[in-house]
Amino acid sequence: MKQAKVNFIAIDEEAVGQRIDNFLLRVLKGVPKTRVYRIVRKGEVRVNKKRVTADYRLELNDVVRIPPVRVAEREAPVRPTDSVIAQLERSVLYEDDLLIIINKPSGIAVHGGSGLSYGVIEGLRQLRPENRTLELVHRLDRDTSGCLVIAKRRSMLRHLHNQLQQREKVEKLYHALVVGKWPARKQLVNAPLLKNVLQSGERMVRVHVDGKKSRTAFRVLDRFPNMTLVEAYPITGRTHQIRVHCLHAGHPIAGDQKYGMDADNQLQKQFGLKRLFLHAASIEFELPDGKRLKVEAPLPEDLAEVLAALKDQL
């Protein structure tokens, strides 16, 4: 092992738009991911002398302070299993020279860290070793399936981040099965959301007057006995937004172990539901040449079987 010194790095155009955690993982090769996330949480990493969270996006001329850390001379990279890599290969919905869009399988995190040795991005880097700058454009919860966009070039990453900041330029549609009869007149949930991290480290989000402005539009797609399939369009982009807004409306998402009711989740298992019924069904945005691209992700087989079982009850 070798002892590093305090290091200050000025961000150039090549790193603009990159998440601070991904930047650190690249710079601090040999440092365990858990250690990297720990120094960010503890505020030992500073950007322009200020604390930041792991999802902070680097800007041009930012100055990143990296504390002394013990760096392993050699560390064998954790390689996703062949089955995971094959699953990701089958999940590709669209690919060109600038980006990849996959139908992310449920149960796989978008990236490693916080106790996970790898995620989708690590698997894709293994699958596409010639693309050295693969970066996540956005995130999906581990249990959520559906459209996930990965940029192959930093220029594309910045282009899509600019569109995400102007929410009207990107349209994401989700399908969710919720508990109860969602009223047809309930077309918008407008409730501020506040993040809260428990002592266990688990991240929770709740509706609170001090939270950030959050809005989700809903449309009923189908009805079943005591269940409703809805389409959700997040007008803003907050952590766990759709899940908490459904809960706030009195209709938690089926299979939600974090925000749902245990009794409901147990009841839903009789229809074969084993996970959160939330699926990113489509995403649409503008390409650098001005053309619009829309990609749709078919409903995974496990969720389609749940709907079939519910229809048998009609």
Image (cartoon, rainbow, N blue to C red):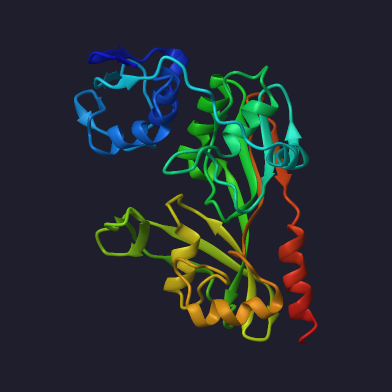
Q: Residue furthest left?
A: 49
Pick the residue in front: 25 or 15. 25
Image position of 25 (left or right of 146): left
Image position of 224 (left or right of 195): right
Image position of 61 (left or right of 291): left
Q: Where does the image place residue 219, in percent across and percent down from the top left?
A: 61, 68
Q: Residue at x 77, y 69 (%)?
A: 305
Above or below residue 105? Residue 306 is: below
Quadrant containing the N terminus is top left
**Residue 182 in sight:** no
Above or below residue 193? Residue 178 is: below
Quadrant for residue 47, please give it. Answer: top left
- The number of numbered badges drawn on the structure is 0
Q: Residue furthest front?
A: 1
Q: Where does the image place residue 279, in percent across and percent down from the top left?
A: 63, 57
Q: Residue at x 61, y 57 (%)?
A: 174
Q: Residue at x 51, y 76 (%)?
A: 251
Q: Where does the image place residue 290, in percent across and percent down from the top left?
A: 65, 28
Above or below residue 84? Residue 291 is: above
Quadrant containing the C terminus is bottom right
Q: Where does the image place residue 237, in percent across and percent down from the top left?
A: 46, 49
Quadrant for residue 15, please give it. Answer: top left
Q: Residue at x 69, y 31 (%)?
A: 291
Pick the residue in front: 176 or 41. 41
**Residue 35 in sight:** yes
Quadrant for residue 126, please give it. Answer: top right
